[in-house]
Amino acid sequence: MAVYDRSYSRWDGDRDRPVRAVPVIAAAGVRKGVTIIFRRKLFAVMLTIAAFGPFVAGLLLMYARYYVMANMADMPIAEAFDDPEFRAMTTVNAESLSFYMLRMQSVFVFMACLLVGAGLVAEDRRANALELYLARPVTVMQYVLGKFGAIGFFIALVTVVPASLAILAQMSLSAAEPGELARLSELMLRAWGAGAVLVMVPSLLVLAASSLALKARNAAIGWVAFMFLLEGPITNIPQEIFNDDRFFLLSFFHNVGRVCDAILGHDAITTDVSVWQCAAVLAGWCVLCLMTIRRRVRPVEVVA
Amino acid sequence: MSAHMSAGSPAPDGPALDAVIELAGLSVRYGKRLALEDLTLSVAPGAIGLLGPNGAGKSSLIKALLGLVPTSAGRARVLGADVAHIGSRLRRRLGYMPERDAAFPALTGFQATRYAGLLAGMPDADARRRAHEVLLFAGLEEARYRDVGTYSTGMRQRVKLAQALVHDPDLVFLDEPTNGLDPQGRLEMLALIRELSHEKGISVLLSTHLLRDVEEVCDTVVVLQNGKLVRHERIDALARSSAEACSVRVVGDREAFEAALTSRGLTVTARKERDLEVALTSENETAPIFASAVEAGVVVRELRPIRISLEEAILHDLERTPD
């Protein structure tokens, strides 16, 4: 039988080691998110295929076109691969990135917010864990940044990461063309800029919703209801009735789309409102979310 | 009323301290309600009992010392550092076991304790090792790989203690640690606290409304009521000062006798059918009782020594404190 020393022993480690609360909290949030997603294995597999399948397929087609054009240019199959539509589909540019990050992957951003983001603060509030966090060398700011890091990781994973890998793949195929490399390098920076907006705004919104609830489910329902109201009755219906594009300023998807398109350099203006107006509204949303989170993330609920 | 122990806490990264907690006119206000009022005291290292009825301000004091609630006036120093500017260096020397049920959600006992260590700045390998050690110490050997959500109340108290200790603090705040424990669990918890404070040199501030817990574990007691300091003394001094009383039976005007006792600074602690219980002065001197009898013109028929328990002494203090 094993014999253990059950008495208390002092720790002789380094007590001046800097506390890295943000990565610790973010890593715990990511682990929890993975656990939630993989709770139902079939669902997780299908979600993964749906989220990354088009990206992998696009990457394979890009390499296939390059291979065919480089090695089989004189064969009949090359004609199909040299088709302008096919070429556009397998070329990484601002338009394709805009389509991929803002349209195709938006459903997965939404799902990441629902599955992972909704419970990040709500569950801690329900379990009275905020008191445990903030009695340790963790500030409110570090706590919020850690939670932001967790949800941001999942949003970046389905948007910025595939976009960056696609650009890197295109770079590897264009290594001999300096002009193309410069274009792709600039595109990479633009993709990261757009990705920052795409990560920041939904993350803050869902963290604010989470901080207002005590259960992940309630936070998720509240967040979906808010989005539905914002996009439907508050934005699109009045816009249709009054035919006034300024109503689009209330739309989350519209504003994020306009700002990200502008950062990507994709000229896709469809409404009369300016990018700066959209950016100002988004900044307002972010400030409102931060104020909400700051108000709700407290170690002690003081009832005067 | 301030009391100091002679031996300082052997803080691993600093010299021994004369006082682990120093308060100077500390007040805490929740809106219009004053939770703590003008507390001034200096508490020496060791096991400190924080006593008081529900709503006395015990938890508010702990939260103020941890920087979790803002102070409205005065100054508080913990381990020599001002809590108004509490930083990570001080926080990692403090441990905290909250009164209410609190846990990092959806983690096992081991994961939660390791996570608490990581949040306190420990390297992962050390946090893992310490988590196992303190969970063994807390008596959660078998259950450490189970979800905390499945734990009984006693086990939850134990895992909260483990989380408070994983980073090896120099001062631990334990807010009602025996709440919800069965008698055996309570004794085990008190034994753990005693080991920490008396054998391992960790100062413990034990907040409770159970005097017996304080008597069993603590060296010093701080009594609060309605946010005010009622008493701050070493337990042994308190026991000495309150140990002796007399049961006095007189024939004659009892009211005049009581008045005479009071005028001599003696306190009648209880009135029974035929007897009065009178707390003696620290010298256990009975002469003032006889002098009072002469003054009131009563005959002392019986004078019998009785002991006043610590509990009675503190209850007496609380009764004397105006709301």
Image: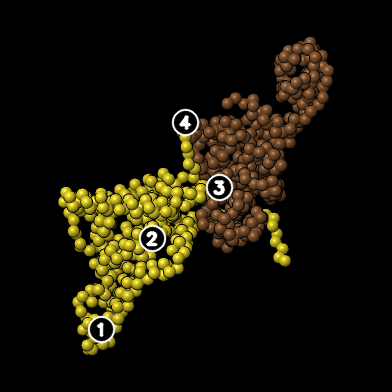
- Relative to A162, say whether B201 is above or below: above
For residue A112, the mark is 2
Chain letter of the residue beneath label 1 in the structure image: A
- Please name the amino acid that badge 2 sits on: Ala
Q: Estimate the spatial distance between the alpha carbons at disc 1 and disc 2, rounded to whole Å.
A: 38 Å
What is the crowding at mark 3: few (fewer than 14 residues within 10 Å), some, or many (at least 20)? few
Who's brown, chain-wise?
A: B
Who's yellow, chain-wise?
A: A
What is the crowding at mark 4: few (fewer than 14 residues within 10 Å), some, or many (at least 20)? few
Considering every residue shown, the one lying at the far left of the view is: A243
Residues beneath discs 4 and 2 located on the same chain? no
Q: Estimate the spatial distance between the alpha carbons at disc 4 and disc 1, rounded to whole Å.
A: 78 Å
Q: Is residue B41 left or right of residue B238?
A: left
Chain letter of the residue beneath label 3 in the structure image: B
Judge depth for marks 1 and 3 and give the one in front. 3
Considering every residue shown, the one lying at the far bottom of the view is: A75
- Please name the amino acid that badge 1 sits on: Met
Judge depth for marks 1 and 2 and give the one in front. 2
Q: Secondary structure at mark 4?
A: loop
What residue is rendered at 36% in x and 68% in y?
A51
Q: Which residue, given by chain and number where applicable, does mark 3 sit on?
A: B101
For residue B32, the mark is 4
- Please name the amino acid that badge 3 sits on: Asp
Query: Within the image, what quadrant is residue B76 found in?
Result: top right
Q: Which residue, given by chain and number where applicable, does mark 1 sit on?
A: A69
